[in-house]
């Protein structure tokens, strides 16, 4: 039986004081902490869908939702497995335009994912009794690897994945060099061996490992191995001379 307004007011007297703000989220000013990631991600999806369906661009959707850049948005959006339908929806909104509602793109993407599932791609995750999930980054990489499917990956997601790959394969030498400068670069084994060969063998033998490490600015293990090699070489050289 329907509850009348008067009856409702008597049973829930505090309801009249409850107000709901249904206005569009205001721009971020940086004066308050960002929303939890899941919430701001959902907010970004709504703002992107609205912006693209009205203007054909993302506008300021990322900033208004609390993201510093599109890359930060895509990092969150692809950080963990999700239902196939959510993956499809998230990609579809980036292809909306004032004249295109995304239905054609959605069908094309669903066909591609069905093909991947039939082929047994390992990035699908079966969930008993629930909708199948997938690993979004792996799924996007698979789409990019298929010449007839790569157009299904939004430009922003493609750029994010390419930047991620570039960072992962970047030469780590600059980082190692920076650490060496901070800690003081130790001589290489060859340099230590060269110096040891100029020393008196008896004196070199008498030095303790702690003294060697201090003398050559290297680890005890490095100095010990270098000394063993030098003394071994001198021993073989002396034996050869005596035999001749």
Image (cartoon, helix red, strand yellow):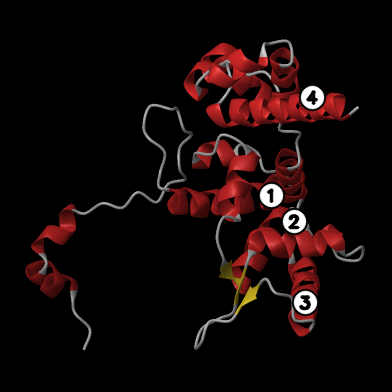
Locate residue 131 relative to residue 112 in the image: left or right: left
Quadrant that contains the N terminus: bottom left
Quadrant that contains the C terminus: top right
Tell which circle, 4 or 1, labels the residue nearer the N-terminal end.
1
Alpha carbons under labels 2 and 1: distance apart: 8 Å
Alpha carbons under labels 3 and 1: distance apart: 28 Å
Whether residue 101 can be seen here: no
Alpha carbons under labels 4 and 3: distance apart: 70 Å
Whether residue 54 can be seen here: yes
User: Which one is closest to the eye, mark 2 or mark 4?
Assistant: 4
- Residue nearest the viewer, comparing 180 with 54: 180
Alpha carbons under labels 4 and 1: distance apart: 83 Å
- Residue nearest the viewer, comparing 236 with 115: 236
Residue where numbered disc 4 is placed: 238
Q: Evaluate if marks 4 and 3 touch, with contact meaning CB atoms under 8 Å apart.
A: no
Q: Residue at x 62, y 29 (%)?
A: 222
**Mark identifier at residue 116:** 3
**Mark identifier at residue 52:** 1
Q: Quadrant of residue 49?
A: bottom right
Label 1 Cα neighbours within 10 Å, binned few <14 / some 14-19 / many ≥20: many
Alpha carbons under labels 2 and 4: distance apart: 80 Å
Residue where numbered disc 2 is placed: 95
């Amino acid at each position: 039986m329907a509850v009348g307004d008067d009856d409702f007011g008597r049973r829930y007297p505090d309801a009249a004081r409850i107000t709901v703000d249904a206005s569009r989220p205001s721009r971020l000013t940086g004066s308050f902490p960002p929303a939890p990631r899941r919430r701001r991600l959902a907010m970004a999806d709504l703002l992107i869908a609205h912006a693209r369906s009205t203007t054909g661009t993302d506008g300021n959707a990322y900033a208004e939702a609390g993201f510093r850049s599109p890359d930060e948005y895509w990092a969150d959006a692809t950080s963990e497995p999700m239902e196939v339908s959510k993956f499809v929806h998230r990609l579809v909104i980036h292809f909306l335009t004032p004249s295109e509602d995304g239905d054609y793109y959605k069908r094309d993407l669903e066909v591609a994912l069905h093909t991947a599932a039939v082929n047994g791609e390992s990035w699908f995750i079966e969930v008993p009794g629930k909708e199948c999930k997938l690993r979004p980054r792996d799924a996007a990489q698979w789409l990019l690897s298929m010449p007839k499917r790569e157009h299904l990956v939004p430009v922003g997601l493609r750029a994010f994945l390419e930047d991620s790959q570039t960072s992962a394969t970047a030469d780590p030498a600059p980082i190692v060099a920076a650490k060496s400068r901070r800690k003081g670069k130790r001589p290489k084994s060859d340099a230590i061996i060269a110096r040891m060969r100029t020393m008196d063998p008896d004196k070199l033998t008498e030095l303790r490992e702690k003294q060697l490490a201090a003398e050559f600015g290297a680890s005890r293990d490095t100095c010990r191995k270098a000394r063993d090699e030098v003394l071994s070489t001198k021993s073989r050289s002396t034996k050869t001379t005596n035999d001749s």
